[in-house]
Amino acid sequence: MHPDFGYFEETKLGKPYDIKLLKRLYPYSRPYRLLLFGSIGLVLLITALDLALPYITKVAIDRYIVPQTDSLFKDSGYDTEAKSRRLKVNVTDPAKRRLVQKYSDLFYTEGQIATIPYDALSQVEKSDIAVLRQNDLAGLGSISAIFLGLVIINFVLNFIQKMIMEYTGHMIMHDLRMRLFTHIQNLAIEFFTRNPVGRLVTRVTNDVQNMHELFTSVISLVFKDLFLLLGIALVLLILNWKLALVSFTVLPIVLYASLNFSKRARDIFRELRIKIAEINTRFSETIGGIRIIQLFRQELNNYRRFKALNHENYLAGMRQIHVLAVFMPLIELLGAVAVALVIFYGGGRVLGGFLSLGALVAFISYIRMFFRPIRDLAEKYNILQNAMASAERIFLILDTKNKLQRPSAPPNTDVLNLEQITEVKLENVSFSYVENEPVLKGISFNIQAGETVAVVGPTGAGKTSLINLIPRFYDPTSGRVLINGHALKNFDTSLFRSKIALVMQEPFLFSGTIRENIFDGSHPISEKDMKNILKAANCKNLIDRLPDGLDTTLSEGGASISSGERQLISIARAFAREPQLILFDEATSYIDSQTELQIQEALKKLMENRTSLIVAHRLSTVRNADRILVLNRGRIIETGSHLELINKKGFYFRLHQLQNGI
Ligand code: TTP
Ligand code: MG
């Protein structure tokens, strides 16, 4: 089989962004659409404020700084005949009148208005200018206050917008993660044999996190940056369309560079992500298989492989930097060229008196603002791409149908009710995990209520696979599993499962206390019953030995206790369910004879008055079974009681002899 490390699907993925994917994401944002629209509205407002700031600078310069006119006479300062600017002063103010008199040879006074040519101002003492231009100073003060006020409002709006955005992003991520979790939890076992744990973990953690970023960055990309770009273009055209067109001459080059960049960046960013995934996989494999690596002294080999991967990652990283290192400065450069064009052409227009100085300054600010989002495009592009890949992978999982659901039946209509399991029957059942590689062939047998049927056979015969069919972890490839004469498919799977208990070959215990592992808390249980169960399951000694007894916390997977002890605890867990049907898959790993005895005793008590199907490796376990099925290479080759099979002197007899060392 081809080793699948969980990153192959990345290479298989299609376009980095896809309208269809965005459409599929939309339902997740629906519950938050009011917040979303609010946030977009705020973005628009913030953009408008951003656009206002350079304009205020322009006003400050043109109206108050350039000594064009006393603020009382804003627009009358330019004398087209004289082709010079003049400061007009209203002399009703005594202080100003005094100064006008002091420089009377420079001023030309008519009525209340004194006029001085702009050039002549250089002959006026600096301290006197301040008085003459008192109104301008006051104007500067208020316009600065307005500027500051807008900046503060902008700050507050930005804060609110960010909070709303992040909140919505987190909520969407939260919903998506819950959806994914529930979906995965309900998938048929077959799915889990195909998908490595690590990959699923990445889906629920990283990929969902990436969706959050997609969400926030797309909003900011589409709304903030796009609006800003359009807004700036519009303002520039309104301010002075000729100058605007001049500065836009660099845009075709910017466009070309951006398209070219995105094409190259796509492959490089993807390559880098694949390399990182490979490193992750190799590293987690190293941790998982550390015993084997150390035992077989694979450290050096493993080191070399990791080193090679790390080097490839470095090369991919350098290629990425190479592209970024060209793109970002290039955009900066083009921005600077645009500014130079504006200074050259616009400066000329100012000199010619066709453009105000303030407008020129504002133009330069706008141009700078214009190139910033373009330059950051590279980073956002990466986020977008990453997120799209994540979205695709998440949907890949969400689109996985649970194969065990009956495809056409409307939910729960002809679902059969089940009180008592009276018979379990397999009818000519065949089963394969992989197509055309059957592990069970033509299996037929039945178990009546109260009977014990045992399955024995060599390793790989298909015993565990057979057990797996009863709780419907898998459906048979052909043939039928019948409960009380009805197809298992027609029962509500979870109801049926509630009536059976399974003790697995390698019992799985959750991290948590032993108590939580045995008693799932679904129904209350008295202290006395609890004691009885523990006693019947032979767990008492084990639990008494542990420092915290029942409340001892197990490490992940129950790794802190031995496999025999794990099986004892899972027998207790089976007891606690009060099942009608017991499925028991005896542990293959070495268990000392005392624990083995304890397990067999516990099992015997568990099976009392119950129907059971047990898989045994030690023939002593099955001696008392009503019937023994001998399974070899997926087929039942012998059936009978212990004595019958011994007398038959067939396969079972030889197994028996082998185990007893005869
Ligand atoms: P099992 O049914 O696991 O064989 P077994 O339980 O008889 O063996 P043991 O005594 O060691 O417990 O396996 C039968 C075949 O099915 C074997 O070739 C492995 C394969 N198999 C899978 O491919 N996927 C599975 O999840 C399992 C359980 C088995
Ligand atoms: Mg097995």
Image (cartoon, rainbow, N blue to C red):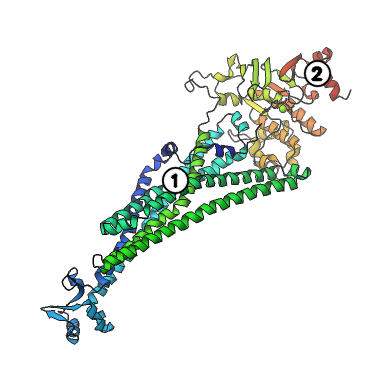
Residue on which the image places disc 2: 652
In the image, is residue 114 above or below residue 542?
A: below
User: Could you classify mark 2 by the number of other residues whose Cα lies within 10 Å: few (under 14), some (14-19), or many (20 or more)?
Assistant: many
Residue 660 image-quadrant placement: top right
In the picture, measured across the screen, residue 662 lies left or right of residue 253, that is right
The residue under the point 72% across, 17% down is 635
Give the label on residue 310, or none: none
For badge 1, the amino acid type reads: Phe
For badge 2, the amino acid type reads: Tyr
Rendered location of residue 9, percent (x, y): 56, 37
Give the label on residue 215, or none: 1
**Location of the N terminus (image quadrant):** top right
Q: Which of marks 2 and 1 is nearer the N terminus?
A: 1
Q: Which of marks 2 and 1 is in front?
A: 1
Q: Front-most of 133 and 117?
A: 117
Give the quadrant of ligand 2. Answer: top right
The residue under the point 24% across, 69% down is 63
Task: Mark yes or no: residue 31 visible.
Answer: yes
The residue under the point 61% across, 49% down is 313
Residue 336 image-quadrant placement: bottom left
SS at mark 1 in the image? helix
Rendered location of residue 631, percent (x, y): 74, 19
